[in-house]
Image: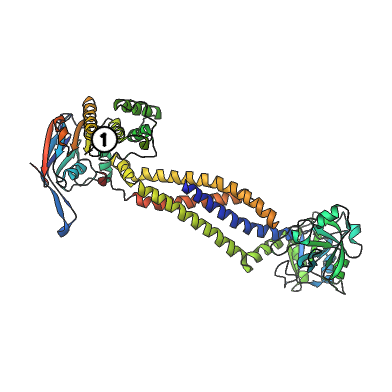
Amino acid sequence: MVASSLPLVDVRQLNFSYGKGSEARQVLFDVDLTIEPGQVVFVTGPSGCGKTTLLSLIGGLRTAHDGHLQTLGINLINASTSLQNSVRRQIGFVFQLHNLLDFLTARQNVRMSLQLIPDLSPEEMDCRAGVLLEKVGLQGREDAYPSQLSGGQRQRVSIARALAHQPRLILADEPTSALDGKTGREIVLLMNELARTQSCSVLMVTHDHRITDIADRIIAMDDGRIN
Amino acid sequence: MAAIVGVIFADLLMWMQLGFLNALFDSALVLPRSLRGDLVVYSPLLKAMQATESFPRRLLQRAKGHPDVEAIRPLYVGRSQWRSETDGQRWNIAVYGVDPADPALLAPGVKEFSKELRQPDSFLFDEGSRPEFGPISDQWRSGQSVLAEVNKRTIEIVGLTRIGVSFQTDGNLITSPTNFQRLFNQNSPARIDLGVVSVRPGSDIQAVKRDLSTFFGNEMKVATCQEFVARETDFMRRRTPITFVFTLGTAVGFLVGFAIVYQILFTDVSNNLPQYATLKAMGYTNNYLRQVVVQESLILSAIGYVFGTMLATGLYALARWATKLPMTITPDRAALIFALTLSMCLISGMLAMRKLEQADPAEVF
């Protein structure tokens, strides 16, 4: 384990390209970024500027080859799939679309992130899933299927899922884009509030300028560089 | 849901094909299995019991010279035509001649009606025969005298027996050797089709078989009853197209089920690719997801098998009623079909999983 004083995310001189050889298209240039524990950081910028790529590299969803990249103290440059997997398990993900499993209830969907924790009994899982669903304001809807929930409610379930295993970092990619302005703001406020109570950092990519006041820090990206 | 229907359908197909194949074997083996004795003596030219090959009775009689032989029983096998009372149509019928006092066949009714069978042109009718012959059993039971025309000769049905039909025979008659020869206009009763030999209790069947084989040399062949049944099975397996046809049918059922289940699982995985990618992003490994698909296919095969077998039971009863063939579900056949169902679902699950590996967690953002 790493001491809590170290940054959760430490990115230095990170370069990334899609494709190889003459086909290669570089999307990240010398990116530097550190996130301290408990910070809420937003990344903004036009589409295609590399925000999402950066997020997926930090989350161990893509492999970076050039530069320095540490997430939760683990070096992810040229990392193996199993190492990436172990990092992913310690991160909460919130996606643009909720990506809930539609054949599982809200509670079972939240349980999916608890099942990867060893030595947790089914009762404990149900209990923790219930507590989180209550925190996101879905008490009484635990046994509803995603199709029976509104867009905002589904995103609440996915926030509960991202927080259930008590990660130290949440990576969110435009979680408000499928929601109306008011609901979107509510959702982001809720996510940040819950993250703070669990002393968990948030790195969120967003287009939405109406919610920028929530962040501790805003990073503007353009054309693969941080301004 | 659709996948379960697919599995049920495939199971039903396999059950029916295997059912007909087994019915064919079972029905054709009823007669060889009901030979009464320990050893069978037959002509070296004999291909199968129904394709008769006669030989002189005196050859069989020589077996009596062996000290351990207790009894010899000749069996006459013939095929003839039964003329239907109602529409004048002729139907093929198998006729067996046995000594009523010491029959070569274990068929019900022979001893009971031994006196009647000694009367001229008296026959036992197989109540398991196909309905085309008319309501013979009912007529006989109601006490009417039942006359019929077989081989252009009027005969009387004096009793009932039960053998059952096969793919080769629609009905059966049993009579005495004398009546058999009369029916087939044979002047000499000296040619028989099969000889059954009983050895004395306590003596070594194999030893008697060896002795008789040496004794008959190239003229006759000797086999134990079990070997004879195996020989009949072997003939059907190799010299008739039935095994190939129905095995092919079973394989087609398997392939159809496989294709349906694969298609459904593949579509399911494709439709849920973002969700599976999400699970991978959360740290689930390919192996975990593989287990999920394997479980899914196990459940699928179990449910499909149960319902498919239930439906097959119904269809078997229908087929028994319509064809009078012995369609039965036995534990080993049930196990075979279950193994086929299971491998069908597992293989298609494994193949569908290759699609799962394409789920890229990086694409969920």
Q: Reply above or below: B142 against A180.
A: below
Name the residue nearer the viewer: A112 or B212: A112
Name the residue rendered at 13%, 36% in the picture.
A34
In which quadrant of the rendered view does residue B204 lie?
bottom right
Query: The C terminus of chain B is located in which quarter?
Result: top left
Residue B340 appears at what percent x and percent y? 52, 52
Chain letter of mark 1 equals A
Task: Find residue B156 and report its image quarter.
Answer: bottom right
Of A137 and B280, nearer the camera is A137
Whether residue B326 is visible: no
> Which residue is at a point 66% across and 52% down the rendered structure image?
B318
Q: Position of residue B114 (x, y in %)?
A: 89, 57
Q: Residues within 10 Å of mark 1 (few under 14, many from 20)?
A: many
In the foreground, A133 or B95: A133
Residue B208 percent location from the top left of the image: 77, 62
Tell me if residue B221 comes above or below residue B342 in the rendering.
Answer: below
| Image-based side of A189 in relation to B241, left or right | left
The residue tagged 1 is: A90
Counting the numbered discs, the total is: 1
Where does the image place residue B97, in percent across and percent down from the top left? 83, 64
Q: Residue at x 86, y 73 (%)?
A: B185
Q: Secondary structure at mark 1?
A: loop
Can you say whether B282 is above or below B160 in the image?
above
| Amino acid on which the number 1 mark rests in the picture | Gln
Task: Name the colour scheme.
Answer: rainbow
Q: Residue at x 17, y 33 (%)?
A: A211
Residue B249 can be seen in this image: yes
